[in-house]
Amino acid sequence: MSTSTPTGTTPTTGANKRIVIGASQPPLANDVLTSTQKVIHEALDRLGYDEGYYELLKEPMRLLTVRIPVRMDNGKTKVFTGFRAQHTDAVGPTKGGIRFHPNVTAEEVSALSLWMTLKCGIFDLPYGGGKGGIICDPRTMSLPEVERLARGYVRSISQIVGPNKDIPAPDVYTNAQIMAWMLDEYSRIREYDSPGFITGKPIVLGGSQGREKATSLGVAIAIRESASAQGMAMKGLKVCIQGFGNVGSYLAEILDRWGANVVGVSDVNGGIYNEDGLDVPNLLDRRDSFGSVTNLFPNRLSNDEFLTQPCDVLVPAALENQITAQNADRIQARLIVEAANGPTTLEATDMLHERGVMVVPDVLANAGGVTVSYFEWVQNNQGYYWPEEEVNRKLELKMVEAVNKVLEMAKSRRITPRLAAYMVGVQKYAEASRLRGWC
Ligand code: GLU
């Protein structure tokens, strides 16, 4: 790794420290439910399941809408709308995060619950998918307001969640502190300690070692395995990371430690690139709590320029719909590993596949988070806690197995890794639904 600054750029002022509520990611476009359904349909079809299975699995089995009155700091009450979607309980309780974002919609939460099912299916976790969301903007709220909202949401959904029913976790703009408030509210309602109700908690409240970095470690392992399938080694691998939030920044740190060459990073302010490699520790040091660092460098690249820079691996770790039909033919990477949810459109996935660029899909690459959430829940249930090395070793085994299974299926059937991942992911739920007599 080079210690030079990006070409033609010098750092300016120090990082602007701010209070962080959670990872910054934008909401998904509403058509995301339709495109997810399209791939699920094709996956079920290729696996030989008839239309009845698609009818059952195309939408969440339950979608609860709640209205939550919150006393704001100015003394007035504001009513927030929230959702909790439970896709399928065919193999066990449902599982998935809660996002706080102004653009949350019922469709988005539904689509995200389908993706959680696929992640749990690919990683053979004993859950179906779930997802929650509240329409709000925590960046404009005080912490006590966020706390009252979090507690109000738990009171509103308490009947349908629980350690053996539906287990929430953090997602966009929610974090371990919010999980702690939610856990406390739930335990008060139930009148017994129930750490397995929610994951992504602080360690002292029963959180798991390794959970915070789990998504990034999983993405790093997915990069290593898929690069190796393409004949590329980790040492010197040129990687561009779009997005420097929690996932992108921990990922840069891990890849740098593993000997890869992080040649580009970007955030909301633009991208920086140096073909000899960036000084990752310096960038991590200077990034602010919303994941901004490139504002310290003049001559930033636009998002489009950044995505089309030369590199071996491109990791979209920020927004949805970033790699589209407009830029897919100009992407120079040989491998795209999706750390964000939904960064590549279906059209772009096909265009890249035809050009021989492998796209490792989100439901495979970023499932390290829910996998370690599962480990957290197991530790809560048995009341026995594992050291970080053990958590990471177990994650490594799961990731290596899942990535290789999906890539082998994609190769042998000559289909995209996305379709292969959906086929692997959905099969368990179709089979369980058949055995339960639902289809
Ligand atoms: N929100 C994360 C995801 O989308 C984690 C979910 C969980 O840990 O249950 O995968």
Image (spheres, rainbow, N blue to C red):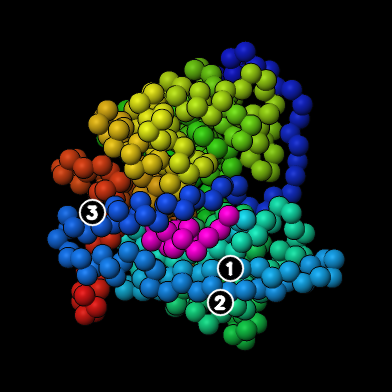
Seen at 77% across and 26% down, the residue is 13
Residue to which mark 3 is pinned: 42
Seen at 61% across and 68% down, the residue is 81
Location of residue 331 by image quarter: top left
Question: In the rendered structure, which segment of residues is drawn in magenta?
Answer: 103-116
Classify 10 Å Cα crowding around label 1: few (below 14), some (14-19), many (20 and above): many
Q: Is residue 395 left or right of residue 298?
A: left
Cβ of disc 1 within 8 Å of ligand 1?
Answer: no
From the top left corner, tell me how far across and down residue 431 is, in percent. 21, 69
Marks 3 and 2 close (CB-CB < 8 Å): no
Whether residue 316 appears in magenta in the rendering, the answer is no
Q: Residue furthest top?
A: 8
**Number of marks in the rendered image:** 3
Q: Is residue 144 left or right of residue 285?
A: right
Image disc number at residue 82 = 1
Q: Amino acid at mark 2?
A: Ile
- Mark 3 vs mark 2, foreground winner is 3
Marks 1 and 3 close (CB-CB < 8 Å): no
Q: Residue 357 or 91: which is nearer the viewer? A: 357
Location of residue 283 by image quarter: top right
Residue to which mark 2 is pinned: 157
Classify 10 Å Cα crowding around label 2: few (below 14), some (14-19), many (20 and above): some
Q: Is residue 412 above or below residue 158?
A: above
